[in-house]
């Protein structure tokens, strides 16, 4: 008898309507060229289809990758978990995915930096 009650209760909760508003996930992928061990963190602009970024962190044990994620999250105004390096972890040329922003928003925010 108890097992039937739990099943009935679970099916009632499962039948609740979902929200009619569904927010689509936006994501943008950009190419970046990272110049580690610079005197300051800065975005130098768009060059040959890649955003040129100077970072103070050295390219040792992922320090430059971590610095890039922190810097981009601050510049773009998104949480760090929204910035992911999806290619080039051991290279200066990286492929970075930004969640929550459109390509136009990313370009605008990087241009004014």
Image (spheres, grey):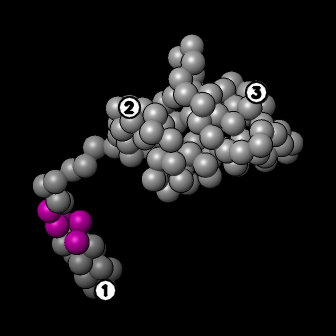
Disc on the earlier residue, 2 or 1: 1
Task: Tell me the quarter of the picture where residue 8 sits.
Answer: bottom left
Q: Nearer the viewer, residue 1 or 70?
A: 70
Residue at x 69% of width, y 36% of height: 54
Residue marked by disc 3: 91
Residue 62 visible in the snapshot = no
Does 44 sit above or below residue 83?
above
Outermost residue, bottom direction?
2
Residue receiving disc 2: 103
Please name the residue that numbered disc 1 is placed on. Answer: 2
Q: Position of residue 2 (x, y in %)?
A: 31, 86
Q: Is 66 placed above or below 35 here? A: below
Q: Is residue 90 left or right of residue 72?
A: right
Position of residue 38 in the picture relative to residue 7 (left or right): right
Check contact, mark 2 vs mark 3: CB within 8 A: no
Q: Residues within 10 Å of mark 1 (few under 14, many from 20)?
A: few
Q: Which residues are magenta?
A: 13-17
Assess disc 2: are there few (<14), some (14-19) or many (≥20) residues with their C-alpha within 10 Å of its C-alpha.
Answer: few
């Amino acid at each position: 008898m108890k097992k039937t009650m739990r099943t009935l209760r679970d099916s009632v909760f499962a039948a609740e309507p979902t929200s009619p508003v569904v927010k689509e996930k936006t994501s943008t992928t950009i190419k970046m060229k990272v110049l580690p061990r610079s005197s300051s963190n800065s975005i130098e602009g768009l060059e040959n289809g890649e955003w040129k970024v100077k970072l103070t962190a050295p390219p040792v044990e992922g320090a430059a990758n971590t610095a890039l994620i922190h810097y981009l999250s601050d510049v773009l105004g998104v949480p760090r978990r929204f910035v992911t390096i999806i290619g080039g972890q051991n290279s200066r040329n990286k492929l970075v995915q930004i969640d929550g922003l459109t390509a136009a928003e990313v370009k605008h925010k990087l241009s004014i930096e």
